[in-house]
Image (spheres, helix red, strand yellow):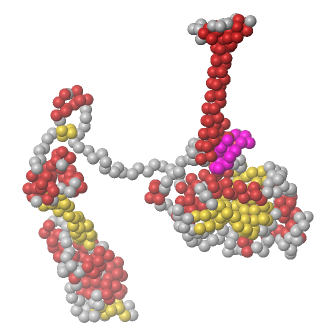
Amino acid sequence: MTCDLTNNEKKVLLALNELGAGELKDIADISDINGDAAMQSVYLLEEKGLTSVTETKVDLYGLTAEGREYAESGLPERQIIEAIDGPTSLDDIKEKISPKLVGFATGWLIKKKWAQIRDGMILPAGSAEKGDDEKVLSSLYENSLEGDTFSPIFELPEEIAPKSVVSDLLKRRLLEKEERVTRRISITEKGRKTVDAGISIKEEIAQITPELLSDDNWQEKYFRPYKIRKPIRSAYGAKTHPYQRMIDQMRQIFLEMGFEEIKGDIVQSSFWNFDALFQPQDHPAREMQDTFHLADRSELPEKYVDAVKAVHENGGSTGSSGWGGKWDPEIARRDVLRTHTTSISSQYLANHPKGPVKAFCIDRAYRRETIDPTHTPEFEQLEGIVMAEGVTFAHLLGYLKEFYHRMGFEEVRFRPGYFPYTEPSVEPEVWVDGLGWVELGGAGVYRKEVTEPLGIKEPVLAWGLGVSRVAMLRLGLKDLRDLYQSDIDWLRKSEIRIDWQRSAQDCRTAGPIRCPDMFPGNVSGHFYFLFRFSSVSFSSSSVFHPLSVCLLFILFLFCLLFILFLFCLLFIFILFSLFSSSFCSVCFHPHSVLSAFHPHSVLSAFHPHSVLFTWC
């Protein structure tokens, strides 16, 4: 055990063996080391079970400058009660005593029942005996004068100063309080046995130098022991906010799937936010309690106004009956904070009416929601659209299922939903252990009432997914507000998941063949892995996928069999060459059998004229 002790620890242990128990100052004096080094050694010895440390916390008090003033001249309420003989007006008291004291002193007069106040007059209530607070102030003042210090060095036991009195003096800032910790250190039985076993203090070497190594005597020196298994202090590096990382991951997924990211203004006209999406003008979502309305107005796009108006009123040329009633352009001009990023998609489609189009938008939307663990007035939404000839509802489900699989949700299902601007419509749900099926957004195929007024003839797939809800599930949060709070401990300890994946640019330039790490479980992707090794990322969906391993094994067997086949052909050719000359000789010469095994037969088989010689 003694070989694990430093010299300072040995000195402290010897001092404690002499004292038995004592305070740090006594131990430092005997061991002849400074207080900080002695305290460090005490704690190291305590970890090894050789010493025991008992801490006692004591509250010490002293007078403030204001407390000293009142100890000398009396408390404000004492000054007032001694300055009056009978009923006295407040104005008269202010002439005798500082006006700034009268205001709060009258309150203490009433609390101590020394006086009453009626109609602006102070009425003494009898004798005003010296209270405990005054006794405490006087006692502290006298002791401070004797000790020549007003620092907080005095204890106030309960029998001398009740807690309520001390609390009042602290509130009045007449006392200052300081907490002092005293430590009593004692040696344990294990420590005594260690001392009895013998402790020798040698010269310690704490640092290895070239001069020390050049001297052969270093092997006889005593090196300070170090505890290398002691846990080190945690270090936290800079990193992206977990929520931002989640958003970046979603963005990366759609970029790898060949989508283009689009952006738009936060302030939108009701025309693009509601009317262009075939949402009726009397829909509850347009009410003040659901939407942030602004005082500004926007100009309507004349190119689409008539068509949108006709669709709303009678269905226009779509075959729909519309919503009926009269469509009001003034309502469509009202500006709002966008309630969804679908308004960005509708404007993008209006500017790109011919496919193919694959676009997405991850941005913030605003609604008048009551703040609770699952709702906030502003939130992120993931919007996506696909427009091309021949796309179907099945493609929509495939896109969504692929996205949620890439986000780490194994089980995905869809249930029918309703939205004014899509038909058919679905709400995707994912399975979360402990929660069951959780709905994460809405999706569908744009209705003709949305696409035809914008001049679009091809089918359009669209979805709007909740980003913050996905982040809650992935990060294991129960309160949506935790995503926006500055909890530095959570930010430091949040895990970072690193995926060695191909960049979005690599996937976009890879041609029609899909990236294997983009589509887990896709057979074509794994065949692509077999024939383009340089383009493959090291992810669990490609290199370590069971199907990839099987295909690699089959390819290896095929190559092995092909090589064996080539060796067999070569062996047959050599045998044929060796024995072809002896074939003719056997027919015409009695010694042909022996000549076939002549030492030179091998060479003759490869002679330039061997063929002619053999068959002539």
Would residue 473 appear left or right of 324 to someone viewing this image?
left
Would residue 35 appear left or right of 330 to someone viewing this image?
left
Residue found at x 18% / y 79%:
160
Quadrant of residue 456 within the rendered picture: bottom right
Q: Is residue 208 visible?
A: yes
x, y percent for residue 12: 15, 52
Q: Is residue 351 visible?
A: no
Q: Which residues are magenta?
A: 510-527
Would residue 27 appear left or right of 336 to someone viewing this image?
left
Q: Nearer the viewer, residue 121 or 350?
A: 350
x, y percent for residue 187: 14, 58
Residue found at x 53% / y 54%:
241
Residue found at x 15% / y 56%:
190
> Is 511 part of what is drawn in magenta?
yes
Residue found at x 27% / y 81%:
164
x, y percent for residue 513: 71, 42
> Is 86 part of what is drawn in magenta?
no
x, y percent for residue 544: 57, 45
Q: Nearer the viewer, residue 147 or 465?
A: 465
Quadrant of residue 122 within the rendered picture: bottom left
Task: Quadrant for the C terminus, please.
Answer: top right
Q: Nearer the viewer, residue 408 or 591?
A: 591
Location of residue 594 with respect to 392 vertically, above or below: above
